[in-house]
Amino acid sequence: MSETFMTECLLSQRIDSAIASCSHFSPRSTFTCSTNGGCVTLQGTVGSFYHKQLAQEVIKTVDGVSQIENQLEVMSR
């Protein structure tokens, strides 16, 4: 495996761990994070604008993240 692939995998694991440790996400939150050289793209749905911003703030704290593109959509109730 290439070093780049290993780095991307490690970053993805860190992000998944950070999101999983945040108790503010409900089962209605369905989103994915993709990485490309430190740039993280969030896609999917969350239950509120608060959760959209919170996802970005949680991921911002992960070592190795240099940029976030937040494409999350808020589900209407």
Image (cartoon, rainbow, N blue to C red):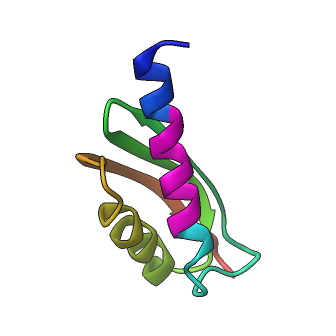
Give the x, y percent position of residue 38.
31, 38
Residue displayed at 67% across by 70% down:
29
Segment tinted magenta in the rendering: 9-18
Point out the image quarter for the C terminus. Answer: bottom right
Left or right of 51? Residue 25 is right
Residue drawn at point x = 62 percent, y = 56 percent: 31
Q: Position of residue 19 (x, y in %)?
A: 55, 68
Task: Examine the rendered structure and indicate whether residue 43 appears above or below residue 49.
Answer: above
Q: 24 or 71: which is nearer to us?
A: 24
| Horizontal side, residue 41 vs residue 66: left or right | right
Task: State the image quarter where residue 75 is shown.
Answer: bottom right
Check the picture and name the quadrant holding the N terminus.
top right
The chief SS type of the magenta part is helix
Q: Determine the image quadrant of residue 76.
A: bottom right
Does residue 74 appear in the picture of this structure? no
Vertical relation: 59 (above or below) 24: above
